Amino acid sequence: MSAKIVYSIRIQKKIRELMEEMPEYNWQEEITTLIEKTVKKKRREQLLARARELHRQQKKDVSAADILREDRDAR
């Protein structure tokens, strides 16, 4: 089981009142799901940007065999 922490946010009073008018929704679950999706999306974007930058920096005239040999020799 993973540890959980409390993260507080401020919302407009009117929004809170509207939420209270819809007790059929589990707002904690809705908000948690949204945050999880957003964090995962942003993390993927960061990793993709990093991979693209590394790819851009790679030497273009080196064969795959040379790269593999270099990697194996480095071990």
Image (spheres, rainbow, N blue to C red):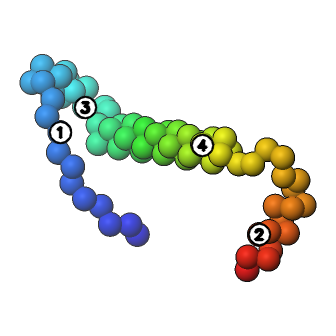
Q: Quadrant of the N terminus?
A: bottom left
* Type of amino acid at the residue the image marks with label 3: Pro
Could you tell me which secondary element the residue under label 4 belongs to?
Answer: helix
First in sequence: mark 2 or mark 3? Answer: 3
Q: Are marks 3 and 4 in contact (CB under 8 Å)?
A: no
Residue 41, given in percent of the width and then of the height, sits at 50, 39
Q: CA distance from mark 2 to mark 4?
A: 20 Å
Which residue is labeled 3 in the image? 23
If you read the primary sequence from the N terminus, does the residue marked by circle 1 or circle 3 appear first?
1
- Residue drawn 77% across and 69% down? 71
Quarter location, residue 60: top right
Which residue position holds label 2? 71
Question: Few, some or many C-alpha atoms within 10 Å of disc 4 (few <14, some 14-19, many ≥20)?
Answer: few
Return the disc, 1 or 2, that comes first in the chain's sequence: 1
- Kindly identify the residue that appears in the image at 73 percent across and 76 percent down: 74
Rendered location of residue 29, percent (x, y): 35, 43
